[in-house]
Image: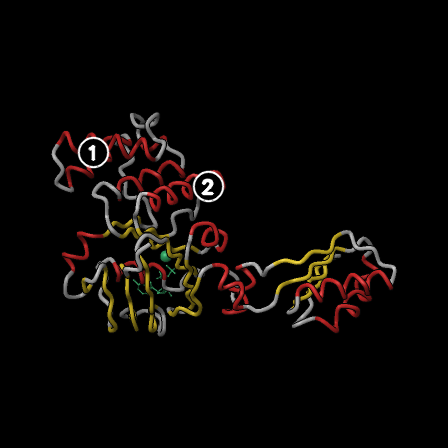
């Protein structure tokens, strides 16, 4: 595995003319290594699309630096554009044309000869499981199929780096899973992907590394596991048979809780530092108090909890 940096951004600032003060990017940093998927995760308005537009040369930054495969996005826009693909938040394919016609058109616009454009289109239709639907107008496609066609279109000229901006927003669960599998295939094919999303689960599923974005700045960065570990505690989850036992269980858990105990109906969640010790101690205390829980489990924090902890905002 190489460690070549294909995306590097440092201290990028962007304030929209006439926009809200502080909206945009406020010292955005990012490093993306070749052959990985990096998830740019953040709530609506965090600056994800702004970052993608700046890195893909569609928008000028106010200050800072950014390079794609070593080429400066400000000074060498042409070199950058030759190496990137962009799948925007809204579909770029033509509704009236068929899937195959769309891909052939993209190929022709990218200076492929007629025969080459057709063969490339068929190859990509196959790769994204769209061969059967290739002759249908895109207006007949489901949301998931459209997104897959979008991804295929962006790969016509095999970019080094593909920017994918919120690929599953607005899709139903089936469409979301289709798109996830398409993104995984891209990476297997060697493309480096920067994917933005508001969904923690999506970042957890697809990304090797995640940068958590809040108010135009990265507030945490690492592998999903590293981010979960950063939070420190694991959770001891208890599900009680009798709601009347909740106060007693909270009291029993007090001595080894590493932070605030959360109660939701008959579920008591206790943050703990020393996992095994806490589990044994809790089991003993419950046994002595003659409380038999329905469930007693140890778990890692979820990315949701990490995000909540770091930003105070639910993604
Ligand atoms: N063209 C624009 N003019 C003014 N403000 C904008 C413009 N585009 C985005 N913004 C503001 O910049 C912030 C970041 O937007 P954006 O990058 O689209 O966030 P995200 O993609 O994470 O939802 C938001 O507060 C948004 O309202
Ligand atoms: Mg956006």
Residue at the (43%, 39%) spot, across then down:
178
Mark linked to residue 127: none
Q: Secondary structure at mark 1?
A: helix
Q: Is residue 265 above or below residue 110?
A: below
Q: Quadrant of ligand 1?
A: bottom left
Q: Position of residue 256 (x, y in %)?
A: 72, 71
Nearer to me, 226 or 118: 226
Q: Quadrant of residue 211?
A: bottom left
Q: Position of residue 210 (x, y in %)?
A: 42, 60
The CA distance from mark 2 to mark 1 is: 26 Å
Q: How is the image coloured?
A: secondary structure
The response on whether ligand 2 sits within 8 Å of label 1 is no
As drawn, the residue found furthest toward the front would be 1
Q: Is residue 105 above or below residue 14?
A: above
Residue at the (81%, 53%) spot, across then down:
241
Verify CB contact (< 8 Å) between mark 2 and mark 1. Answer: no
Q: Is residue 132 above or below residue 84?
A: above
**Left or right, 182 with reference to 301:** left
Q: How many marks?
A: 2
Disc nearer the start of the sequence (2/1): 1
Q: Position of residue 88 (x, y in %)?
A: 31, 50
Residue at the (26%, 40%) spot, across then down:
153
Of the 4 image quadrants, the one containing the N terminus is bottom left
Q: Quadrant of residue 203?
A: bottom left
Q: Residues within 10 Å of mark 2 (few under 14, many from 20)?
A: some
Mark linked to residue 104: 1
Q: Quadrant of residue 272?
A: bottom right
Would you name the residue on which mark 2 appears? 177
Q: Position of residue 121 (x, y in %)?
A: 24, 33
Q: Secondary structure at mark 2?
A: helix
Nearer to me, 282 or 249: 282
**Left or right, 44 with reference to 66:** right
């Amino acid at each position: 595995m190489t460690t070549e940096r294909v995306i590097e951004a440092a201290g990028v600032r962007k304030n929209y003319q006439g926009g809200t003060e502080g909206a945009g990017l406020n010292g955005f940093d990012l490093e993306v290594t070749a052959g990985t998927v990096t998830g740019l995760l953040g709530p609506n308005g965090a600056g994800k699309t702004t970052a993608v537009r700046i890195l893909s040369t569609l928008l000028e930054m106010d200050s800072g630096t950014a390079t794609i495969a070593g080429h400066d996005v400000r000074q060498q826009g042409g070199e950058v554009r030759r190496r990137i693909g962009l799948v925007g938040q809204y579909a770029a394919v033509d509704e009236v044309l068929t899937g195959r016609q769309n891909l052939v058109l993209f190929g022709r616009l990218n200076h492929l000869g007629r025969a080459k454009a057709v063969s490339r289109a068929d190859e990509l239709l196959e790769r994204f499981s769209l061969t059967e639907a290739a002759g249908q107008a895109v207006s007949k496609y489901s949301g998931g199929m459209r997104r897959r066609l979008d991804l295929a279109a962006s790969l016509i000229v095999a970019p080094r780096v593909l920017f994918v901006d919120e690929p599953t927003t607005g899709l139903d669960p089936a469409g979301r899973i289709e798109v996830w599998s398409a993104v995984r295939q891209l990476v297997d094919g060697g493309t480096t992907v920067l994917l933005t999303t508001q969904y923690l689960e999506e970042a957890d599923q697809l990304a090797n590394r995640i940068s958590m974005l809040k108010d135009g700045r990265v507030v945490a960065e690492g592998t999903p596991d590293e981010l979960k570990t950063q939070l420190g505690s694991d959770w001891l989850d208890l599900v009680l048979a009798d709601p009347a036992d909740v106060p007693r269980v909270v009291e029993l858990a007090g001595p080894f809780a590493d932070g605030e105990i959360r109660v939701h109906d008959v579920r008591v969640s206790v943050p703990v530092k020393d996992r095994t010790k806490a589990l044994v101690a809790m089991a003993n205390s419950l046994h002595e108090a003659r409380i038999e829980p329905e469930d007693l489990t140890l778990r890692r924090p979820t990315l949701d909890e990490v995000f909540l902890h770091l930003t105070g905002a639910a993604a």
